[in-house]
Amino acid sequence: MMGFASNQNIMPSRSVFVFVGIFFSGLALAQQQIPGRQTPVRQVVLLRNARVIDGTGAPPQEHISLLLRNGKIEQIGGPELKVPAGAQVRDLTGKTVMPGIISAHSHLGLLVNDAESVATGYTRENVTAQLKQFERYGVTTILSLGLNRDLVFVLRDEQQAGRLAGATIFTAGRGIGVPDGAPPLLAAADQVYRPANEREARHDVDEMAAHRVDMVKIWVDKLHGKVPEMTPQIYKAVIDEAHKRHVRVAAHEYALEDAKQLVSDGVDVLAHSVRDQVVDDAFVKAMKQHHTWYVPTFTVDESAYIYAQRPGFMQTTFFQQAAGPQLMAKFNALGYADTINQDPQTSQHQKDFANGQQNLKKLFDAGVNIGFGTDSGALPGRIPGFAEHHELALMVQAGLTPMQAITVATGENAKLLHAPDRGTIAVGKRADLLVLDADPLVDIGNTQKIFAVYHDGHTIVGLPGHAK
Ligand SMILES: [Zn+2]
């Protein structure tokens, strides 16, 4: 089984997995290798007798067969679907298949070992490791929403040429912040623009557009009055210039007043929950009128305090392998819970989280475009791969059904990204699939019971669910 041997070097050093869960049939095709992509390349795979959640919100279908070839879903049928010569056949009786998860708000290269914020973390080695972690957890596409070094464009090109593994990169490049203001994260000078005037802001947009960014990111937040905030003059110039270049704009925001102004000025995506208060009907109406997307990112606030409460999920292998030993050591350190519980910011985060939960339910029920993201990778505790599964549970906690949450994170998010080749299970779509041991419609926590991940037709190994 040369596939297994060659996969050793994509395993993170902190993890020891036993390869029992996945086996390749004796009919496996020639296992041609490409640099950086150590998994066997695009076998023809026939998945049999699965329950399928297709990402459109339609009811699940039973006893479905899916034929994967050349990175695409080539055929969908029932038990009658013929096994092509040389195909690997996998019986998925009792299992559920859903589209790979898409995060429209994550970050790369800001953390080292998921545990420390480091201004020098944006390296090929670190970014690649994070992409692979997302992929192992079934997050097959991510939008890295700002604070990227230009290396991201090189890596995206390598992926498009089939030379680099890991979650598929969409990127907002550096993004546009404020001198002495947001974003307050540690970053190198070549990771974010901080224009002083409209002319500089337009220049920065042009530079990113020349790199073919998938989105422009701006930060509009005075951080509770602690720092200067981006002025409407600047962001109007950014939005205008970006739209001239056919690039959309996503804003970090916090306050309802800012959100309203951004929406009326034409921003395309609000990349966090409105959290300072419960939104009013005028805001709901404006969001619908402008077709603005809203991405809640509950992980942002919840991750600031939840680990001090030692929730049960922290005992799972699924969590611990994503967090890694350095972050687990922080959580387990003597005094960690006291520090969090005594931090005056903690009660603020709890209020913000509660407002965000109410706002999602209100906006969703009103028919506003809801997208999915976590801000994973921005700070320790926003854990790539784990955060996305936990965010689904937090959306259900806010009042969405499991089906609604899954649809937002797959089919709807593909619409947000303007990526019609993914997000749903249909003939011709990318073979980006998550195979689960249990039905997530019964319990959204079952998205964490991963049996297998397919990404672009590749079988991804080294899953937490396979350490058995
Ligand atoms: Zn972010």
Image: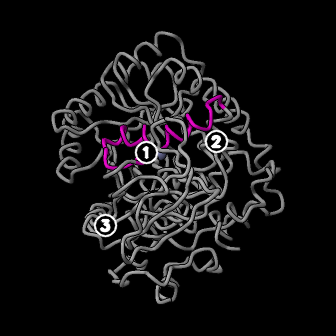
Circle on res. 441: 2
As rendered, which of 353 and 143 lies closer to the eye?
143
| Mark 2 in CB contact with mark 1 (< 8 angstroms) | no
| Mark 1 in CB contact with mark 3 (< 8 angstroms) | no
* Residue 385 in sight: yes
- The span shown in magenta is 398-425
Inspect the image, locate mark 3, and give the three-letter code of the amino acid beneath it: Asn
Quarter residue 247 falls in: top left
Residue at which label 3 appears: 70
Inspect the image, locate mark 1, and give the three-letter code of the amino acid beneath it: Ala
Q: Nearer the viewer, mark 1 or mark 3?
A: 3
Quarter residue 219 falls in: top left
Q: Nearer the viewer, mark 2 or mark 1?
A: 2
- Seen in the picture, residue 88 relative to 331 is either above or below; the reply is below
Quarter residue 234 falls in: top left
Instruction: Give how far apart the Cα atoms at labels 2 and 3 are.
Output: 30 Å
Residue 196, position as x, y percentages in the image: 28, 38
Q: Residues within 10 Å of mark 1 (few under 14, many from 20)?
A: many
Quadrant containing the C terminus is bottom right
Instruction: Give how far apart the Cα atoms at labels 1 and 3 are.
Output: 26 Å
Residue at which label 1 appears: 104
Q: Residues within 10 Å of mark 2 (few under 14, many from 20)?
A: some
Q: Is residue 218 left or right of residue 118?
A: left
